[in-house]
Image: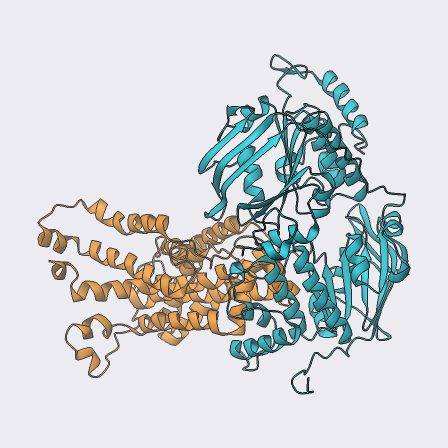
Amino acid sequence: MLSDILTASVIASAIRLATPYIFAGMGETFGQRSGVLNLGVDGIMLLGAFAAYYAVLETGSLLFGVMAALATGMLMGLVMAFVSVTLQAEQGISGIGLYLFGLGLSDMLYQRLVGTPVHVDGFPRVDIPVLTDLPVLGEIFFNHNFLVYVAFASVPLSAFVLTRTTFGLKIRAVGQNPEAADAMGVNVARIRYFTVIIGGAFSGIAGASLSIALVNFFQGNLTAGKGFIAVALVYFGAWRPYWVMAGTLLFSTVDALQLQIKTLENALNLDIPNELAVMAPYVVTLVALIFASKGVEKPTALTKPFERGE
Amino acid sequence: MSDQSSKPVVPKRIQAVQMNGIVKRFPGVLAVDHVDFELNSGEVHALLGENGAGKSTLMKILYGLYNLDDGEIVINGNPTSMRSPNHAIQAGIGMIHQHFMLVPSLTVAENIALGMRSSRGMLLDLDVVSARIRELSELYGLEVQPEAPIWQLAVGEQQRVEILRALYREASLLILDEPTAVLTPQEVDDLFRILGQMRDDGHSLVFISHKLHEVLAISNRITVLRDGRLVDTIPADTATKQLLAQMMVGREVVMRYEHAARESGESRLKLDSVSALSNRGDLGLRQVTLDVRAGEIVGVAGVSGNGQHELAQVIAGLRPSAEGKVWLEGQDVTSSSPAKLNTLGLSHIPEERMLDGIVKDFSVAENLVLQDFARKPYAWGMFLRFGMIARKCKQYIREYEIKTPSHETPTKSLSGGNIQKLVLARELSRQPRVLIAAQPTRGVDIGATEYIHHRLLEARDSGTAILLISEDLDEILALADRIVVMYEGQIVGEVSREDADVGTLGLMMAGATVAKAPNISENVIK
């Protein structure tokens, strides 16, 4: 019976749906590990999604689309870093401000510059010789667009940077004990600027993975709160890239299942109200979050601005 | 030892440091007022002074954590500006702070590698770092596991990591800010041995302290600060405790108390195998059985974090007990509310006076009546009687020598010593049956300490049962009739006032179970 529900196409769809969350989650992991909670992820994703969409619409170049998303994301990251690190504003509130700004601006730009829904030619599925033709495995793992692979590749890369490089060590130290890092000659503000801008770039590409790879169009509030889910997934994953990825896959699998609710109902002989099905991924996330381990990796300086001297 | 194996501790970089006419202002305070300080290679120079005298501030200026408002720093004859810790580190200066600058989730090696250039560029070279750590720990007898995460280490070990880090960074000048506050007497001896070795290797050391006997034991020269000003710099061999205390306080200090032997009365506070969880979720307090009688002071000695905090909180009703019973004058008060304990005659001088002792933004008067404001004579029904409150408070301020401009002054603007006197006034004026005094003189200047000690002894003589919890062994030895020692949440030993000596107590504080007999060496069980 499980094979009736978790078909190859459901798993493949779960992997695809995970893409924006993984990008946004990795970016947010960097920021939070250094002690900055960026709640504006969703707003940055929306602007990134629009920038990528508009660039592809105008130029037809996917490369330009990606670059536009990255640049937009980094710019927004810079704004967040300036507000939260330099001006030491309350992070939760400034993040929500950033979200509302991104939500409004992306919709306004779309109305002004595009107006009517037009599809763009986004990233096509990549055919990998031999692998794509494998039965089952081919459909699950080797039948995706380019950005899906980039997203999953960013997980081990992020883990490597955090645990094996001097930069990663500084990030972890700054997030847990900025006073200690400062006393050891680490420039706390610079590290936080870096991580928040990296987070912005990830959020921008997360938006692009929606607008020019998954759905290939743009509309107001395209992300529908995906950025906030990504923030929750970072907590759920206890600030570790692989765990964040695991949490994301759990979430996106439930999401993929609810998209195929009709098939599911037939398979299980059940009558599930559609509203409940749509709620399911969020309920699962919420419940999982309650039981998520706090762990010793928790950046204890999260949301706390740093200023030298007691 | 051959030249290769005893290699680079490179103490040559700093030969001499002069700090001339240093001034540092904080909003409303002149923290350091034209202070001169001088340090040479191969010497331990002690900085002595009470809390708030400016010792730490002066050294944080040298380490680049604070920018100076006036004056100059001269290193090896060259005027140098220290705009950030990075400048100081480059110049070869290391500092061990009072609160350790370690990241708990990182390992020893990671903490030491933090902020250092890696031999592999952007990649961490923790194996290289660990190898060097092992070399250095052998050279100085500083035992430490490079792979252990900091949060698993005891405080003494964490300090070793700090010292190793300074050695690793080839600091030739090391500032130690109150390094002995968290150590057992034996660990202090160990630290002094290491510091001695570093000095002989040509390091310059600044030893910040307010403990006179330690300063006399380790330093070559002693500089005394008071209220941000330089009192004098004198060679250690001409100094005496009495002289130093006088320089610190500005008047003569009598650190000896009348401690008349006294028959203790009936049992007032009784604990019957009480256990409690710590904030970390493990058993912070384990099966503690204790009896405090009327007219006696029972001292609880121990290194910070061995269950003393939980003990005070359980008795004061601020932490639920996991098992066991607490009795107050024969009445079962296990897990009673603080309000109820209050009415039964329990007073509590909490460890964190700024958090649990007072409301910072309230006035002195409001804090003085914090418990009893709703009762007579301070209240008339639901109305406060401000005239009565003011009158009573003025009386307490006079009686307990609280230095405050008025009873309406915000409490947070008082000094630590005066805030503590305020708490003491509030708790003692209720003539408690039982008093829990947790770290009553921590961060309090000598003058106020002396005063608080006298008041505690007075309360004892008038029949109050006092449980004195302190990390300051001298304080316990001066005041307590009986001493119990806590280690890892348990009471590991008890000695009477007559049998108490620092060596035995120190061993117990380090976890050795010692029988009550005076001869230690034969009775060490573990």
- Which x, y percent locates residue B272? 49, 34
State the residue in front, B311 or A288.
B311
Could you say which quadrant of the image residue B419 lies in?
top right
Tell me, yes or no, if residue B68 can be seen here.
no
Q: Quadrant of the N terminus of chain B?
A: bottom right
Could you say which quadrant of the image residue B386 lies in?
top right
| In the image: residue B32, left or right of residue A116 | right
Please name the residue shown 77% across and 79% down the image.
B12
- Which x, y percent locates residue B165? 63, 70
- Which x, y percent locates residue B188? 69, 59
| In the image: residue B254, left or right of residue B515 | right
Could you say which quadrant of the image residue A140 lies in?
bottom left
- Which x, y percent locates residue B489? 53, 46
- Colour assignment, chain A: orange
Please name the residue shown 79% across and 32% down the image.
B402
State the residue in front, B224 or B252.
B252
Please name the residue shown 23% across and 45% down the image.
A275
State the residue in front, B329 or B495.
B495
Say which chain is cyan.
B
Label tally: 0
Q: Is residue B35 above or below residue B113?
A: above
Q: Is residue B98 above or below residue B335?
A: below
